[in-house]
């Protein structure tokens, strides 16, 4: 498969796969803070955002699989290591799943160029992946580097050189994107057709002067 | 939390070498191995420190495990304990402070490295 298995003492590298790291979730609309008086208070972030003192809060946590995205030269020195969450393929990629090997091959091949938001990880029981998995580039988490180093026994594997090369390109490609109006070079006729085909986004699809 | 037999004490590997900065996380445990009996006297204090301070005791560990100390450092076992709301708040704020200190220190090191590089290029 596409994985290799470094020694537990090996330094952390981009492409390392960890099991059981904490993903923290909080809501700006309502959060529970622990006041100095040891009283819990539910407040919107807006109400306390200008508080000059640091605060303690109760946050949601879930233990997740994750893959290191911090690049190798930084994983040995930076204060924090960044990772992307790994979830089961159908949870990340909401498409009708193929039912034949041929269709799976086609999906896996084309996803590498057609999508930019996830990275395919094949099943491998040696890693702990009983099913097909995917890296969700939209779901990032961050952990202290030194803490992660002490928990390298949670590392279940690492992308092999071929997969790692592809992974880092896809990762860079995802974060290199920038938002732009994809209709900017359209003629008026092309613009009208494009807008008609995207009724749910019609309010934000505004014409450039040459499309009026 | 701490397991000991005739020759070893188990504590977190991050204690090794105080890996702040760019040291390799691979540190020889042999370098930290000495006869344990020389330090039996400090073990109760170390144990209590870890039991009641959790990971926070790690920052104090170098005071006890100096260059003369005598234990083998390996993986720490998980620990659960009940805490009061007050202690929960203290733990949360401590993690915040430590994170900010780590980032500040790293930023200083980066700035120093950059300054050195810049000066070198000017010469």
Image (cartoon, coloured by chain):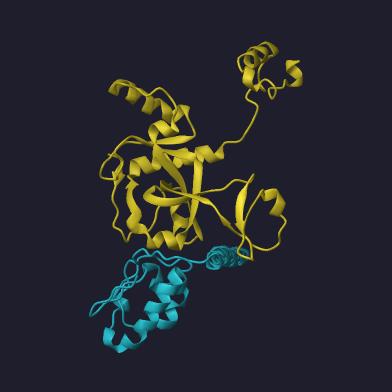
User: A106 or A54, which lies in front?
Assistant: A54
Q: Going 29% across and 73% down the picture, which residue do you hit?
A: B3
Q: Is residue A192 left or right of residue B97?
A: right
Residue depicted at 34% across the width and 88% down the height: B41
Q: Which chain does the cyan colour mark? A: B
Q: Residue furthest left?
A: B6
Q: Is residue B108 left or right of residue A133?
A: right
**Dividing the image into 4 quarters, which one contains the C terminus of chain B?**
bottom right
Q: Where in the figure is residue B74, as x and y percent of width and height?
A: 31, 69
* Observer-nearest of A164 and A107: A107
Q: Which residue: 71% across, 51% down?
A: A47
Which chain does yellow denote in the image? A
Residue A82 screen position, x and y as percent? 49, 51
Considering only vertical position in the picture, is A179 above or below A72? above
Quarter-of-image position of residue B35 = bottom left
Question: In the picture shown, does residue A51 fall above or below B64?
Answer: above
- Residue placed most toward the observer, A75 or B63: B63
**Side (left or right) of B34 relative to A72:** left
Q: Position of residue A116 (x, y in %)?
A: 49, 33
């Amino acid at each position: 498969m596409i994985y290799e298995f470094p020694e537990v003492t090996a330094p952390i590298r981009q492409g390392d796969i960890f099991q059981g790291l904490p993903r923290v979730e909080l809501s700006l609309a309502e959060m529970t803070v622990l006041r100095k008086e040891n009283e819990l208070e539910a407040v919107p972030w807006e109400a306390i955002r200008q508080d000059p003192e640091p605060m303690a809060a109760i946050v949601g946590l879930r233990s997740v699989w994750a893959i290191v995205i911090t690049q190798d030269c930084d994983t040995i020195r930076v204060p924090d290591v960044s990772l992307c969450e790994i979830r089961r393929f159908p949870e990340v990629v909401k498409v009708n799943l193929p039912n034949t090997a041929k269709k799976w091959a086609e999906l896996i091949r084309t996803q590498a160029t057609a999508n930019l938001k996830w990275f395919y990880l094949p099943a491998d029981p040696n890693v702990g992946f009983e099913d097909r998995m995917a890296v969700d580039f939209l779901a990032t988490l961050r952990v202290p580097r030194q803490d992660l180093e002490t928990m390298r026994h949670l590392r279940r594997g690492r992308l092999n050189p071929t997969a790692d090369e592809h992974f880092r390109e896809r990762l860079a490609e995802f974060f290199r994107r920038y938002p732009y109006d994809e209709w900017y070079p359209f003629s008026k006729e092309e613009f009208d057709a494009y807008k008609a085909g995207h009724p749910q986004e019609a309010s934000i699809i505004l014409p450039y002067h040459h499309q009026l | 939390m701490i397991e000991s037999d005739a020759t070893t004490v188990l504590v977190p590997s991050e204690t090794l070498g105080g890996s702040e900065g760019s040291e390799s996380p691979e540190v020889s445990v042999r370098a930290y191995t000495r006869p344990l009996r020389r330090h039996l006297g400090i073990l109760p204090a170390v144990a209590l420190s870890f039991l009641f301070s959790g990971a926070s005791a790690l920052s104090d560990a170098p005071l006890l495990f100096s260059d003369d100390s005598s234990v083998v450092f390996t993986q720490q076992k998980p620990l659960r304990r009940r805490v009061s709301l007050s202690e929960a708040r203290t733990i949360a704020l401590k993690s915040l402070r430590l994170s900010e200190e780590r980032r500040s220190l790293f930023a200083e090191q980066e700035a120093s490295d950059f300054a050195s590089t810049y000066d070198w290029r000017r010469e």
